[in-house]
Image (cartoon, rainbow, N blue to C red):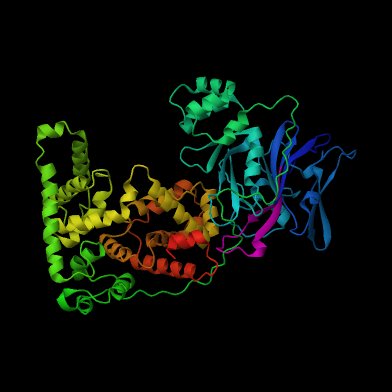
Amino acid sequence: CPGAPPLTGSRAQVVFEKGGVYLHTSAKKHQDPDSLIAGVVRVVEKDNDVLLHWAPVEEAGDSTQILFSKKDLFSSKEHKTRLTTGLHQGGSHQETWLESWPNPTGAMCPLAPHTSPDTVPPPGAEPSCPRDSWAFWVSLGELKSIRRSKPGLSWAYLVLVTQAGGSLPALHFHRGGTRALLRVLSRYLLLASSPQDSRLYLVFPHDSSALSNSFHHLQLFDQDSSNVVSRFLQDPYSTTFNSFSRVTNFFRGALQPHPEGASRDLHPVPDDEPEPGFEVISCVELGPRPAVERAPPVTEEEWARHVGPEGRLQQVPELRARIFSGGLSPSLRREAWKFLLGYLSWDGSAEEHKAHVRKKTDEYFRMKLQWKSVSPEQERRNSLLHGYRSLIERDVSRTDRTNKFYEGPENPGLGLLNDILLTYCMYHFDLGYVQGMSDLLSPILYVVQNEVDAFWCFCGFMELVHGNFEESQETMKRQLGQLLLLLRVLDPPLCDFLDSQDSGSLCFCFRWLLIWFKREFPFPDVLRLWEVLWTGLPGPHLHLLVACAILDMERDTLMLSGFGSNEILKHINELTMKLSVEDVLTRAEALYRQLTACTELPHNVQEVLGL
C-alpha cells in the first residue's frame, strides 16, 4: 500500500497455499482465455495477524516458486527480500520489493507497488491494466462473511465480503481446494452458517464477547446469548448438539482447542480433491442462440378442424404444439382449458365428456355440502376449518379486485372463489388452503365462469403445483436449485455477480415460481402464459426457462448498474406489469433450443429439461 512502512524484521509464514485459483474478469457469458487470470491463494501468518493473499502467476509457471516457498519468508539476512512475481512485461522480469507487501492495518492492498485499494478491479470488469494489479490481500479480521458457490456445473468459487461491505473478486478454484481453504480459515475464525442461507458463512473472531454480540443476528438461541457463549466455549460439543444445530462443522472445529505444542500447519491437500456435490465440468460451450418466432393464437376454426367423429379430438400432439407456439384465442379458452388441465380427456367423445361432467358435478356438491352443513357451534370446535375459512375470506377479499369480474363489494365472483377454495379443503385434507391459491383460481374462474368446471380445472392446476404450497418447502427449494443450475450453464458471469451481492440463492424469484408469475404480468398476459405452460412443451419445466428469460433480459441492468442485494430485489419487484409475455416466451424457447443443441449438456441439466 502507498505509504506502508518496510516490514524490516517482520516474520511471516505461509500456512496454506493453493494454485489454480482464477479470477474471472469478464462480464461476458462465455469467458475467453484473456479474461481468466491464473493465480495462487495463500494464508499467511505475519506478526500478530493472519492474511489471505491472492496474486496472479503465469499459468505455465510453478506456483510454489513464483512468489515464495512455504518456508519462513523473512529469515533471509537481507531485510529487503524480493518477491518475484514471475510476470513479464515488455520482455523484462518484473519484481516487487518487500515494502510492497501489505501492512497489517490495511483491509486490501494490491501487490503492485503503485496501486491503492480503490484501484483493484471489481468482479466483472475488463482488465485494462497489468495482471499483477489484480493482486489483493485482506486481514482475516476484516472479513464479514464468506459465500460458497452452490453445487452446479462450473468451478467452485468463494466470495469474500469485508466488514466495510465490499466484495473482493470471486476466487474460482479450477483444481479444487475450497474445502481445504475453509478448513484452514476455521482455525482463526468462527464460521457460522447463516440460518437464511446455508452457503453463506458468517465470520466471527475467536472472542466470546464478539460472539455474544453477534448471536442475535444469527437468531440461533432463544435464551441468553452470553450464557450460551460461556457454556459453548467450555464444552463446545454438548452445547453444539443441544442448541446450536444450525452452526456448521467448521464452527465446531474452530472452537476445538489445539493441544499444547501441536503444529498448526495444514496437511497437504491433493490438487484433485473433489468438491462435494459438484459435477466437475471444465466448460459447457453453448452454440449461438437460435431465432424464434411465435405463431398466431389457435382460433375456433382451427380447433374445429381437429374435432372428428363423435366429438373426439384428432391429431392432439399437433394441436398441443400449436397452443404452445401461439396460445389460444380468448373465445376458445373456456373449452380448451378443460383439456389442458385434465378435467376432460383429450381422446374422449362428446357423450363421454357429458357423462364425466355429470359425475364430477355430483362429486363436487357432495364435498361442498360437507362444510356447508357444519353449524357455527360445530365450527367453534373445529379450529382447522375455522382457520381455513378466515384465511380464505381474507385472501378472496383482495384477489384481483381491479378486474371487472371481481370488483365491487357484493360481487358474486368473490362468493364463488370462497366456495371453491373451501371445497378444495374437503378435497385435499392434507394440504387444505395456503395463501396464494386464490391467485391461481381467479383466472380459471374468470375464463370458465362455472363453479364446478372451475373447481375441477383448479384441481388439475394444483396437481402441477401443489408441492409449492407444502409446509416443508422442499419443492420450492428444488426448483430454485434447478433454476440456478440452468442459469449457471446459460450465464456464469451473472451467477457470479448475484453471488457477490448475496443474491445467489435467487430468493427474489420465489414468488415467480410459487404462483407461476401471476403477479408479474398483466391479467390477459397471465392467461396466455399459463395455457402455454400447461401444454407441457417443450419440457416439464418451461416455467424455469421463463424465469431464466426474464433474468437474461435484465442482466445488463443488474450487472452494469452496480446493484447490491437490496437494489436487486427492488428492481425485480418493480418489473411487475412491465414485462411482455410474448417477448419472454420467445426468449424462453430460444434458451431451450440453445441448451438442447449442446452435444455435451450435463446429465443433471438434461434431467431438468426433460431430455
Quarter of the image with the N terminus is top right
Count of marks overlaid on the render: 0
Name the residue: 76% across, 59% down.
60
Q: Position of residue 197 (x, y in %)?
A: 48, 42
Please provide the residue range marked out in magenta: 20-42
Q: Position of residue 140 (x, y in %)?
A: 65, 37
Closer-to-camera residue (19/596):
596
In the image: residue 254, left or right of residue 412: right
Compared to residue 280, the image places residue 296 above or below, namely: below
Residue 24 colored in magenta in the image: yes
Compared to residue 5, the image places residue 478 above or below, namely: below
Q: Position of residue 309 (x, y in %)?
A: 17, 78
Residue 576 at least partly seen: yes
Closer-to-camera residue (524/245):
245
Name the residue: 49% across, 56% down.
485
Q: Position of residue 273 (x, y in %)?
A: 66, 49
Residue 568 colored in magenta in the image: no
